[in-house]
Image (cartoon, rainbow, N blue to C red):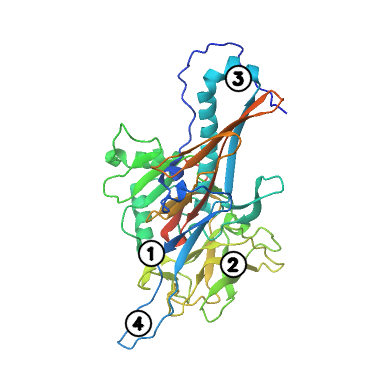
Amino acid sequence: MLPQNILKQVITYNDSGLAYLENLNCFISTANKKFKNFENIEGNLGDTVQFDVPPRSIAMNGLVASFQSAQQRFGTITCDQAANSSMAFTAQQFVFNVRDYMEKFGMSRVEELSTKIEKNVARNADSSVPVMTVDSNGQSVPTGALHTESGPFRFYGNGVDQINSFQQLASMLALNAEFGVPAGSPDVYLPNLAIPGIVGTGLNQFVNDRNEMMANSWDLGTYKGSNARYYRSNLLPIHRSGSVGNEELTLTVVSTNDPTGANITEITCSGAPTSDSNAILSGDMGQFVDGVSGFADMRYLTWTGHEECGVPVQFRILEKAGSNGGGQVTFSVFPPLSSQIGPNQNLNQNIQAGMKISFLPDHRCGMVVSGKALFMAMPKLPDESPFATGTKTNMATGASLRTYYGTLFGKNTRGNITDAIWGSYAQPEYCMRIAFPLNFA
């Protein structure tokens, strides 16, 4: 059935000069899409691309070797996301109203499509990109699962206090680098509404190193003394936390799934609301509390070198966890935590009963990404024969869009569709969430 079009019944139009209400699509523009010309290969929904991740090892004291097993590490992006924007006209509408206006119709649909893609890629900051599948009608639909292996497990900020000063930004970058950071400038994605407060507290110190004539609206450049590149976005995800975080409760460790501390993936705590199915939600961020009597502070080891550093032990929840009638809750954590010597050791001590854990409340998710570790695959789609098809790949960004056009035989309907498939992934140890309050003062 042809949609009801609302078209001005004139043949000649005067260009108003109104610009499109564009969004700040910094994630699409800055994501790493260099996969040996993967963007130039025709792809289909479900196609995958892999990239290598540096392997881990450990150095031992002395000259007597203890041989380690070699384990190659890699990440996988699956192009399981798809979206389209379409429009249909009768032959009369096309001839008398639309033909000279097609560029604007097309641009409006591309802007809408790009916003949908940008929002999906930005959700890596919340580790909540949905896993998609194709239903019996050929539509891509979410499965209910999330790509929980992607995205940060460390964070900066408490989700309550404003992050609005250069000192806070410097502390954030220092905390990110303390864990280990590759060479080069990290990318920092900030909420658009946080920028005025940061600029205001910085007075005249916010001096951007950029070409003003060529600058994009989302590119804030760098400020003096910083090695990071800052971007602003109006599409950053909001994380809705469980009741433990929103009620600012402190939980007490009861036990773990592995008392030896070799591979801790589950922690059981007391102190949650009783019989609460929403005590802790997927993507919630937790942290071991400092200054607990009788215990040394929990600290991460550096990712490379396995030396104790100043980063508190933080983690991300993989699955929703409800509490029982006694207020106990068992939750799964990412990454796996280990205090045993070996390539995967990341704790300065074993987790013990009586330690305390707190969780973030609802917050808006910014992100720091080091080493261009936010990946996006966006291959070009095949021709839709017998319909006239055009595919455009931006060689600078690796982004591909397909447009195809055709008619319904004998139905006086002409249709035009623009679509794309993509997948994205943020390597966890290379990134950190920035927890902003939901409201900006």
* Disc 1/disc 2 C-alpha distance (Å): 22 Å
Contact (CB < 8 A) between labels 1 and 2? no
* Disc 4/disc 3 C-alpha distance (Å): 74 Å
Residue 22 appearing in the image: yes
Q: Where residue 422 appears, x then y in whole percent? A: 53, 47
Rendered image: mark on residue 60: 4
Position of the N terminus, as image quadrant, is top right
Q: Nearer the viewer, mark 2 or mark 3?
A: 3
Write the residue at 31% across / 55% down. Answer: 184
- Which sits earlier in the primary sequence, circle 2 or circle 3? 3
Within 10 angstroms of label 3, few (less than 14), some, or many (20 or more) residues? some
Report the label total: 4
The kind of residue tagged 1 is Phe
The kind of residue tagged 2 is Ser
The kind of residue tagged 4 is Met
Of 296 and 416, which appears nearest the observer? 416
SS at circle 4:
loop
Q: Compared to 294, does 102 lie above or below?
A: above
Rendered image: mark on residue 179: 1
* Disc 2/disc 4 C-alpha distance (Å): 31 Å
Of 217 and 36, which appears nearest the observer? 36
Residue reaching furthest to the front: 386
Rendered image: mark on residue 94: 3
Contact (CB < 8 A) between labels 2 and 4? no
Within 10 angstroms of label 2, few (less than 14), some, or many (20 or more) residues? many
The residue identified by callout 2 is: 332
Q: Where residue 352 appears, x then y in whole percent? A: 53, 77
Write the residue at 63% across / 64% down. Answer: 272
